[in-house]
Amino acid sequence: MKKISKVLIANRGVPAVRVMNTCRDKKIKTVAIYSTPDRLAYHVFLADEAVHIGEAPPHDSYLNMEKIIKVALEKKCDAIHPGWGFLAENADFAELVEQAGLVWVGPPPEVIRLMGDKIRAKKIAQRANVPTIPGLLNVKTVEDILKWMQEDEVDFPIMIKAASGGGGKGMVRVYTAEELPVALEKAKSEAKKAFGDDTLLVEKYIRSGRHIEVQICADKYGHVVHLYERECTLQRRNQKILEEAPSPSISDDLRQEICFTAVRLMREIGYHSVGTVEFLLDPKTNKFYFLEVNTRLQVEHGVTELITGLDLVSLMFSIAEGHPLPFEQDDILPNRHAIEVRINAEDPKTFNPSFGTITRLEIPQGPGIRVASGVYEGAEVPSYYDSLIMLVMSAGADRSEAIRVMDRALSRGLRVEGIKTIAPLLLSIIRHPDFIEGKFSTRFIEEHHEELLSMVKEKTADDEVLKIAKYVAEISALGPQDWM
Amino acid sequence: MDYIFVKPGMSPKEIVQKVRELPGVCFVSVGMRDAGQSDYKNRLRIYDLKTLAPYYNEMGLFASECHGGARWHVGIMNRRESPFEEIAILRELMPNVLLQTLIRETNMWGYRPYPKNIIEYVVEVVDIDVWRCFSFLNDVRNMRPVAEVVMKRGRLFEPAISYTVAPWFDTKYYLKVVDEIVDLCGGVDEIVLCIKDMAGVGTVSSVTELIDSIKQKYPDLVINYHRHITDGLAIPVLLAAAKAGAKIIDVEEDTLVRFYGHSPILAVEAIFREEGIPVHLNRKAAEQAVEKVREWIRDYDWAESPFKGFDHMVTRHKMPGGAFPSSFEQAEKGGFLHLMPYILQVMSLYNQIVKYFDVTPGSQITWVTCSGIVNRYAKEQGEEGVKHVIKLLKKFVEEKNQDFSAMEPWEQEELLQLFKNAPGDFKNLILGHYGRMPVGWPADWVYQSTFGDEWGNKIKERKESSPVEAIPDEDLTALRKKLEYELGRKATEEEFILYLMHPKDALDFIKFREKYGDAPLYLPTKVWREGLKKPGDKVEFIYEGKPYCIELVSIGVENDGIIHVVLKVNNKTRVFEVKTPRAKKEEVKKAVRPNEIGAPISGTVWRIGNPKRGTLKVGDIVHKGEEIANLESMKMENPVLAPFDAQIVEICVRLNQMVEEGQLLFVLKPLENNANIENTGESNIEKLPH
């Protein structure tokens, strides 16, 4: 057992802030790292200490493994927490951390490596009797795909995926044979760029599928407990933007089945720390298929925390220190419904990233709301990193109460100016009758985009008066205008 | 005593009956519309005008003219107020008062003839009680669509005859126009007839004779006399009109009266009383309104016309009161204010050659044509040249009585050049696109001068029909789609109507209001125009019942085209970054035409071409569906595909350049088999005849 009293957080923004908050609770000292454009970022000042790690490009800063480990050693840290994204699922980095004598706050490197290879992960799942989507592993050419489709009687659409992928990168949906060459190229190139590996696989695309994932928590002594599932069906460009727990789309029987399947798989691969098994549910047949294992803390872990009352980051540290799980499966009794939305700095119409200074920021407050923010009023959102600036979560006794709380948080509480965010779109989603009824698929946003955008924006007197103030500022500075 | 005798909601018949029953006369106050148009370029804001509403509500007016004319357009363009907001505010503050608009038959509140379906659609929606409608050609046929919808809605239609004094517009002529109006409106019981003396040129005898003749023929017809004061003789003529039988007289607050508007309400009441004509007016409320104006009128000094003073020569040049300040404004902006006296002289000669009424859009046609002629001579031959052309026109009109053949050959030659640069609207006018001209088409030499060798054909094209019949209906659904495309959202009914009237300015207006909210409605005029001056200055107002205070903390020094302004908004300090006109303008060229390929998203151009072919260069042939570039954004790749078989004409970006969405990447030339792509013209409201 190795006590962690100082940790380097190899991340920025929302994940870094999230981890630091728990460290503060656990009296673990924190060291932040930052790139040049992040020198005034929120996470830098929340940490106990901070170290400049390099220039803007991720490879020079947040992906610079040697430098990060060197800094951790210099600052006398005991451990490194990777947050999510960047190096969180990089097995080489995890190994280097351990070789340097530091604690890796995450699952074993070999498990990361195994699960990071989608093709091997799929094979293991098949061996463990976990259902998988019909597909072809290790695709090289268009001809491979067409041959497989013919032999296995698979119709378009199909999905091309990067073998070492995640986060929607290197994932391309294909509807016709004509699109195939360009799509294959795109997936290959994206995969190469994002993961340094252009091995691809192809799968049947399940229409109207729903993403259900099971949160797992396991210690180093073989205890594997699930913390129930999350529904992550709402996505845009294969990236989740709204998650909730429990899933509104499965029965209790199916819930038990999925959760225990996940536990079985994770036990099989010797997992420890927290992690997630993702499934795709075909609502027509009520069959679920294994998608992948996320060997890290996930963005949406907060909804699980809200329904179970646990702190997953705290558990990660305890497990990493070598403590056994402090609970059994029967102790986990979720009793609430929780929703999370991702506030991305993006144009809600086009999903194009929106960079710049946040000129006004009001953070939602009040009963049932939890916020994890990576920014502050006046902060810059740099163009180099991902667009997530804040997570807003709501909880209630049941789903409709959680939706009501989220509505208050987004319509009356949250205000972000200076950059665009997808908050107006998120508000439209949670007000959409189909969402309220729980009728949606991964294509909900594409299918309803137009309609979601046209929903009326809520105005408040404060917002309106700030527009008037803007006018007063301009005329005070510039004097009478020609157009008057 | 309750002075309210007509109210919104009454039927036209009831209103007309109430006016007939009055022992004397009643007033229309034009204080909220024409007063501001005539002397203040329509800049008087609803923020100030609404302070008069509580008095109007008790004054016993026939109506308040508060809408229409150029107030609509200037509202969205300069005051950034919507006419719909104004109606809503006034309805709430003066529920007793009939709200009156001024509408230009087929041109409505815009500057082009609209098709019937647009006229009907718009008139159906605007919540106005009294519809004063005029035609600058007195072509009563043009009024039909407005008349029909207004009367069907149960609102009061007030047809106006455009009035001026000229030998060819005699009483017989006007009586014929009245006949046509009475005919159009099915009698005299549900209308009020307006005599619109927009230049203010009627004399005691001419107006007495006209009203007297109308009353002899139509004793029950209620007549409203509208007369500007530019000649300095308005009050005696108003008195004459009342004595001859006009029941309604247009007036404005004494404190608003300058030189081009209307007579002072209190003075008119006083002289009528002295002359034994009962006036239905709560004089005390009228006095309070007159006083109220003093509280804000000095904030509009900047909007006043630069030439102050009466001008009896208006009886010759006939520029209407409503057009004076805007003409001066244009002359000042165009740097030819010193030529104004010459332009007015040319107008007085021109209006004898091309005969119609100088009121919108006629007054604009006259102005642009005449100022154009004077400017052309001034530019080519200096002031002497201007004097020369005036001498020539004087000879032609006054000495030779417009006998073209009586002019010397070189003078004929010069006259044949007179209209060669005339504006398109002048051409449309003499081709009949606005309707029939009141006393016949101009002489042939005018056509020859305007159209050159084409003139014979042009005369053949000339239309005798009304534009109401000639203009095809427009596709309202398509127009609405176009607006919504521009806005990127659904448009409200009101926004759509603003757009139908003035497409470009309405878009600017909507965007302004999206950015600055209700600033035009809540800021006092001084702050609206000049902002806050020194630290500690503040502006306070109530918004949705909540008190707000905006206080100036500091205005920074300009640096790189940016000024930082610090304000306290309800005690919370906020910094505003204000871009000055010197701010660097980064012009990004956007793809607009079908053969221009724009960036599908914002990102980095990391590849031009595709892996199979490598880099592309100008002159290369690309095929439909072929990847021609690839953009990266947030680690996602986004191929740009050729939309058709084409040759690359221009590559507008460099490798690894950051581009924004829609930025021009490639210019392509379609290969022959699909060359028609370049010519996909779409119909556009601004391209239609004005």
Image (spheres, rainbow, N blue to C red):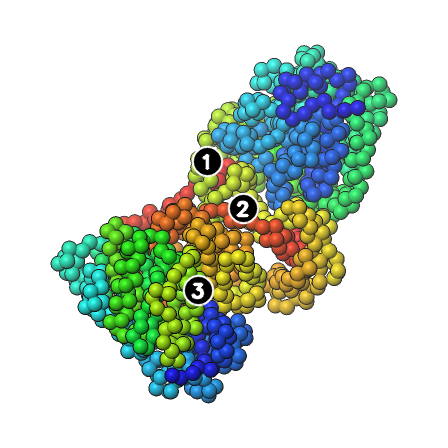
Q: Assign a secondary structure to mark 3.
A: loop
Query: Residue placed at 53% from the left, 79% from the top?
Result: A48
Point out the tag, 1 or 2, that comes first from the N-terminus.
Answer: 1
Residue picked out by circle 1: B476
Q: Nearer the viewer, residue A275 or B160?
A: A275
- Element on which disc 2 rests: helix
Q: Say whether marks 1 and 2 touch (CB < 8 Å).
A: no
**Numbered mark located on residue A309 in the image:** 3
Q: Nearer the viewer, mark 1 or mark 3?
A: 3
* Chain of the residue displaying label 3: A
Q: Which residue lies at the image location 22% right of the left edge and 54% below the top edge?
A: A156
Q: Are marks 2 and 3 in contact (CB under 8 Å)?
A: no
Name the spot of residue B63 as percent of width and height, x first. Answer: 69, 28
Q: Seen in the image, is B263 located left or right of residue A96? A: right
Q: Residue at x 53, y 49 (%)?
A: A458
Is residue B159 visible to us here?
Answer: no
Which quadrant of the structure image shows residue B139? Answer: top right
Q: Tell which of B102 and B95 is nearer to you.
A: B95
Quadrant for the N terminus of chain B in the image: top right
For label 3, the crowd category at 10 Å Cα-Cα, with few meaning under 14, some 14 to 19 and many 20 or more, is some
Q: Residues within 10 Å of mark 1 (few under 14, many from 20)?
A: some
Q: Is residue B298 above or below residue B270?
A: below
Q: Chain of mark 2?
A: B
- Residue located beneath label 2 in the image: B507
Q: Quadrant for residue B420, please give it.
A: top right
Say whether mark 2 and mark 1 are on the same chain. Answer: yes
Residue at the outermost right position: B274
Distance from disc 1 to disc 3, alpha carbons, whole Å, reads 57 Å
Mark number, residue A405: none
